[in-house]
Image: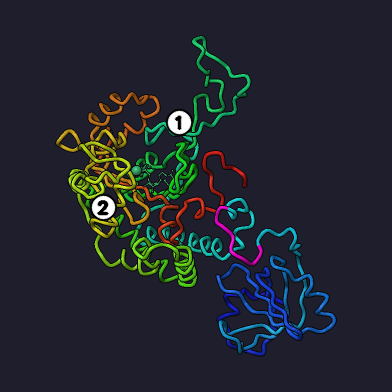
Amino acid sequence: MKRTEVRTLLKRTDFGELINVKGWVRTKRSSKNVAFIALNDGSTINNIQIVVEINADMETLLNHVQTGAALSVDGILSESMGSGQKVEVQAQHIQILGEANPNEYPLQPKKHSLEFLREKAHLRFRTNTFSAIARVRHAMIFAVHQFFNERNFYNIHTPIITGSDAEGAGEMFQVTTLDLKNLPKNEDGSIDYKKDFFGKSANLTVSGQLEGELAALALSKIYTFGPTFRAENSNTTRHLAEFWMIEPEMAFYDLNDNMDLAEEMLKYVIQYALDHCTDDLQFLSKRQQDEEKNKKANERSMELIEKLRFVLDEPFVRLTYTEAIQILKNSKPNKKKRFQYLVNEWGVDLQSEHERYLVEKHFKRPVILTDYPASIKAFYMKQNEDGKTVRAMDVLFPQIGEIIGGSQREENYDKLYAKIKALDIPESSMWWYLETRKFGSVPHSGFGLGFERLILFLTGMTNIRDVIPFPRTPLNLEF
Ligand code: 4AD
Ligand code: MG
């Protein structure tokens, strides 16, 4: 018989039909004459209840129906009299597809810590929390593509292996086929990359932006959605060594257009989640409340769905870095020295404690900061007339801090060239980028949204390692 997915079954009302359902056992409860199996197949957060009349044959079989076992069940779709579900299946025939020995299977029906589940990343998809996150992630991937497609943006695949450092931060993973135990050397002792696979040194990309700009300067509006890699040794709850980034790039857009697009995109995908992920968000909301039940009332997060609606309702606050520094300097936590990094002077880089203060305490809504000091931003950002600041924008979110980083790009050849020289960036790795400013250069802008940071926000999870199936962080490469 053809299998029906649980999410479809739960919506059906044609009771009395014979159906087949397959999935993994979440729990089993037995009384003298009847057993109840909660079966889940990942198509929804909800389980379907399988009701089994216990007779001699079924009794032996039920001994093998353990949490984690995979079953195929033929039975009658029935209206449920029990509370909690409308539909159930009266089992006629049960086949065990794969057993799960309870002495060995790690996911027993009790609460497991997220730390424990990170060590069981090969099985954690089978928990409610991680299957919910996986479905929200999928919905967001889809929503991002839909958003851009509806607005005539073209999706561009930018390279994963590159010869340049787009962010100029030197946090790259090298790619080589050289024998590390026997490296070819130049006369001065340096490594002879001419003998390497590409005849030059190569890295995993930190951003698709530079190549994205090349495409935008012909196609007008493009976006990339790819993996990016950063070898920053920061073991925080917001950093991964491998993460996914969405990078739109638009010709003829100035910084204001760029901010409008960023705000519109974030609101669009959040609305999409509210419209399409109701069951999963409700589960995640309850999970977050359980998790925080021992916290003081004023330390608890806003209820998840309320928080998402809240972001949709208000326009994001827009202000300059200089204005933000004034606010931070005069803020209570700064004066009382409660910030770990005190804000004393113009020019300092903002830490996430500062970003979160602005968003969560001062403005109480998302904030877009613009016009940062040139010295703390990447080389490609458009230089302002003041000679000190650049047309940068960071979108700051509650609980997350920076969720988007972007800018208007420097389109003037001489200014960009001078900057590249001043920063000692090798022209040999940037000549093609520079050429776009020689031929038909136009004002243009773009930004990067950290996909996992978006998922953190949407799911109310607190560690970025829990919103990507297989996190890569320093000293962590198990799965
Ligand atoms: O601010 P970043 O470094 O900007 C860029 O890479 C630009 N090339 C984007 C552009 O203008 N096209 O990174 C963009 C976003 C950050 O705001 C953050 O959300 C995320 O990427 N991000 C990370 N997410 C997880 N782990 C990390 N190590 C991250 N580094 C940045
Ligand atoms: Mg940034």
Q: Looking at the picture, which amino acid does disc 2 mark? A: Leu
Of badges 1 and 2, nearer the viewer stands 2
Q: Residue at x 74, y 58 (%)?
A: 104
Q: Position of residue 361 (x, y in %)?
A: 26, 56
Q: According to the image, label 2 marks what residue? A: 358
Secondary structure under the numbered disc 1 in the rendered image: loop
Left or right for 32, reference 324: right
Left or right for 4, reference 53: left
Q: Residue at x 25, y 26 (%)?
A: 418
Q: Position of residue 426 (x, y in %)?
A: 37, 24
Cβ of mark 1 under 8 A from ligand 1: no
Image height of 87 relative to 342, above or below? below
Residue 419, quarter of the rendered image: top left
Majority SS type along the magenta span = loop
Q: CA distance from mark 1 to mark 2?
A: 38 Å
Q: Residue at x 78, y 83 (%)?
A: 54
Image: magenta residue range: 108-115
Q: Residues within 10 Å of mark 2 (few under 14, many from 20)?
A: many
Q: Looking at the picture, which amino acid does disc 1 mark? A: Gly
Q: How many marks?
A: 2
Sequence order check: which comes first, mark 1 or mark 2?
1
Image height of 236 relative to 32, above or below? above
Which of the image's four quarters has the N terminus? bottom right
Q: According to the image, label 1 marks what residue? A: 163
Q: Quadrant of ligand 2?
A: top left
